[in-house]
Amino acid sequence: MGKLIDENGIRLDGRKLDELRPVKIEVGVIKNADGSAYIEFGQNKIAAAVYGPREAHPKHISLSDKAIIRCRYHMSPFSTEERKPPQPTRREIEISLVLRRAMECAIFLEEYPRSIIDVYVEVLQSDGGSRCASITAVSAALADSGISMRDLIVGCAVGKADDQIILDLSDKEDKEGQCDMPVAYMPNLDKITLLQFDGVFTEEEFKKAIDLAIVGNKKVYEILKKALTEKYFKTGEEK
Ligand code: ADP
């Protein structure tokens, strides 16, 4: 019997190997933003806000043929078990960068020359897999803002614990398991826009993990689509 998975293939939180944590997405939650979303992914609670596209200032940071994206991923000091220092950590700088790169694949940047799109991610509570939950929230916020995109992006991690491939690692599985591989995915284009990796997989395990990540991401996509549709109908009723 493993430490994180029992003999029936059940994980510590009662999930099967290929089961996501409960996911809840709400779109349009921040009045002052051009687009916003809130996601609960297991115990992760994350808000994303998009401002722009607007004229880039100072001008020298702008590009004449496309928009630039500025992204800040921030964990609130009370989001982790031990109080996190409020200044940006190396991890937050890294996640801000990988989120920006993932978004650059999806947005039609050339439609917004000389402008800037600001993306803010605030992690209120974190529970492992926060970068994946963040990219899903950001994509919902971008869609809410009306920015032209090739596709939505969804995120979900896969990994290995007790020698088994598992979907959507919890914080404990992330820290005590053997492998963690966050994957962000554009479901209609069938393209991966973010892939990071920490641990060791055999070639066969890697293939199995990628397939499972795509299955998981497609499930997240269904939830995201539903959240966006709900916002659309709600807005319709309010008119
Ligand atoms: P991700 O959240 O994308 O899985 P990591 O693998 O780097 O990113 O982190 C895993 C988890 O570790 C986070 O979701 C969070 O719960 C926890 N964590 C991250 N940074 C800190 C920190 N400074 N203090 C305590 N816990 C942290």
Image: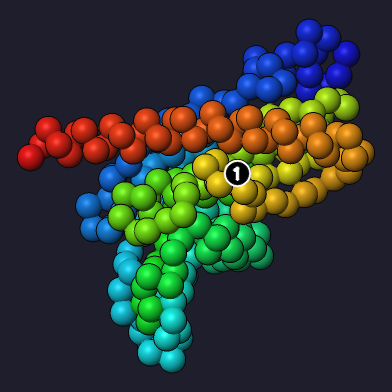
Q: Position of residue 180 (x, y in %)?
A: 75, 41
Query: Is residue 98 in view from this perspective?
Result: yes
The secondary structure type at the circle numbered 1 is loop
Q: Quadrant of the C terminus?
A: top left
What residue is at 77 percent from the left and 35 percent from the top?
209
Image position of 177 with respect to 143: above or below:
above
What residue is at 66 percent from the left and 45 percent from the top?
183
Q: Position of residue 56 (x, y in %)?
A: 36, 81
Mark 1 is on which residue type?
Asp
Res 24 → quadrant: top left
Residue at the limit of the structure toward the front, as seen here: 189
Q: Position of residue 47 (x, y in %)?
A: 41, 47
Image position of 130 with respect to 167: above or below:
below
**In the rendered view, does 60 fall on the left or right side of 13?**
left
Q: Residues within 10 Å of mark 1 (few under 14, many from 20)?
A: few
Residue at the limit of the structure toward the left, as seen here: 239
Using the image as rendered, state which of residue 208 and residue 13 is in the foreground: 208
Using the image as rendered, state which of residue 208 and residue 181 is in the foreground: 208
Query: Is residue 42 in view from this perspective?
Result: no
Res 28 → quadrant: top left
Image position of 216 with respect to 130: above or below:
above
Q: Position of residue 140 (x, y in %)?
A: 40, 46
Residue at the limit of the structure toward the right, as seen here: 202
**In the rendered view, does 110 fall on the left or right side of 29?**
right
What residue is at 83 percent from the left and 39 percent from the top?
206
Residue at the limit of the structure toward the bottom, as seen here: 60
**In the rendered view, does 173 fall on the left or right side of 44?**
right
Please give the residue where the numbered disc 1 appears in the rendered image.
190
**In the rendered view, does 199 fall on the left or right side of 154?**
right
Using the image as rendered, state which of residue 212 and residue 16 is in the foreground: 212
What residue is at 52 percent from the left and 38 percent from the top?
44
Disc 1: residue Cβ within 8 A of ligand 1's nearest atom: no
